[in-house]
């Protein structure tokens, strides 16, 4: 199945990250052309690939139709983003040329749905990683002053809620990247169509998917370690403080007991 087989056709692919999660099972109002990932037809021409990560990749969709289609999808997007990440790619369809990446475009033999799914998988991962890179950068901005305070003053001076929130943010990014985004996995279509694996690997290398994933994992591990260390120090500080309170209470109790023994003892007759 394909959009067209006209030689030397140029087609625009546009990936948008709309939110944290998109449930394809609720999208039965759209005409399904393929699944895993879900491919649907767009009114007035073009196709859209819908990904669980919250990304949608449009092929050959006019700007006005894009606005209408995305507006329809908003109802199915969980935790929509305030700022939509996007990625554009120009496709050249030419059965006489070698399939692969050429400078600012990708050459395809045809627009078979399976090929569109492969491209959508990479573009969807790219916009997801771009959004997560921004989140990790913001997390670093928040955690850096805490680490510097520990280095210069020997104490964290942070509340537990802030540190736990940092750890939770890092875990959420990892879950979205590995779980819903499946960044480290090949799409199912590759297992069914081994002839498309070379195209997939070329695109994966072009967008540096694995390198970006590894860089994010290292940064997330550092954020986790820093927050966990500060939290341990905070808890240790609180434990020491509680121990001192207990010691003080014991001393006070002993002092009161001695006071009663020496000053409130009833004289014997």
Image (cartoon, rainbow, N blue to C red):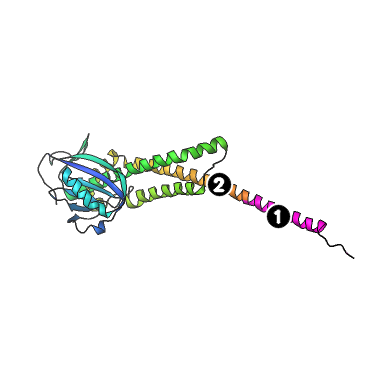
Q: Residues within 10 Å of mark 2 (few under 14, many from 20)?
A: some
Image quarter in which the C terminus is found: bottom right
- Is residue 71 part of the magenta span, yes or no? no
Residue 233 location (% of width, % of height): 56, 45
Query: Between disc 1 and disc 2, whose residue precedes?
Result: 2
Would residue 253 be counted in the magenta stretch? yes
Label 1 element class: helix
Helix, strand or loop for the magenta stretch, by majority: helix
Report the residue at 60% width, 50% height from top.
239
Residue to which mark 1 is pinned: 250
In-image side of 221 versus 38 (left or right): right
The residue tagged 2 is: 234
Front one among 130 and 66: 66
Whether residue 47 is visible to the viewer of this picture, yes or no, is yes
The boundaries of the magenta stretch are 242-269
The reply, left or right, for residue 105 in relation to residue 81 is: left
Tell me residue 5's x, y (percent).
10, 45
The residue carrying pointer 1 sits among few (fewer than 14), some (14 to 19) or many (20 or more) residues within 10 Å by Cα, namely: few
- Asked if residue 146 is positioned above or below residue 41 in the image, the reply reads above
Residue 108 % position (x, y): 17, 42
For the point 19% across and 49% down, the residue is 69
> From the viewer's perspective, is 103 left or right of 260?
left
Q: How many marks?
A: 2
Residue most toward the bottom? 269
């Amino acid at each position: 199945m394909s959009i067209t087989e006209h030689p030397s056709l140029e087609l625009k692919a546009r990936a948008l990250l709309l939110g944290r999660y998109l449930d394809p099972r609720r999208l039965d109002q759209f005409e399904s052309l393929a699944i895993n990932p879900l491919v649907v037809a767009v009114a007035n021409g073009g196709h859209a690939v819908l990904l669980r990560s919250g990304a949608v990749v449009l092929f050959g969709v006019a700007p006005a139709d894009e606005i209408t289609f995305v507006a329809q999808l908003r109802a199915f997007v969980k935790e929509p983003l305030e700022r939509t990440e996007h990625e554009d790619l120009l496709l050249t369809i030419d059965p006489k040329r070698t399939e692969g990446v050429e400078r600012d475009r990708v050459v395809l033999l045809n627009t078979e749905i399976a090929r569109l799914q492969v491209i959508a998988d990479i573009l969807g991962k790219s916009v997801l990683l771009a959004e997560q890179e921004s989140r990790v950068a913001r997390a670093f901005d928040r955690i850096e002053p805490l680490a510097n305070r520990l280095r210069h003053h020997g104490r964290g001076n942070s509340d537990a809620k802030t540190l736990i929130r940092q750890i939770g943010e890092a875990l959420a990014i990892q879950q979205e990247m590995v779980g819903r985004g499946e960044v480290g996995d090949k799409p199912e279509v590759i297992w069914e169509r081994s002839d498309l694996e070379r195209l997939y690997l070329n695109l994966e290398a072009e967008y540096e998917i694995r390198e970006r994933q590894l860089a994010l994992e290292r940064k997330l591990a550092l954020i986790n370690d820093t927050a966990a260390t500060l939290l341990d120090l905070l808890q240790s500080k609180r434990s020491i403080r509680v121990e001192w309170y207990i010691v003080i209470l014991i001393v006070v109790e002993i002092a009161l007991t001695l006071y009663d023994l020496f000053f409130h003892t009833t004289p014997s007759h």
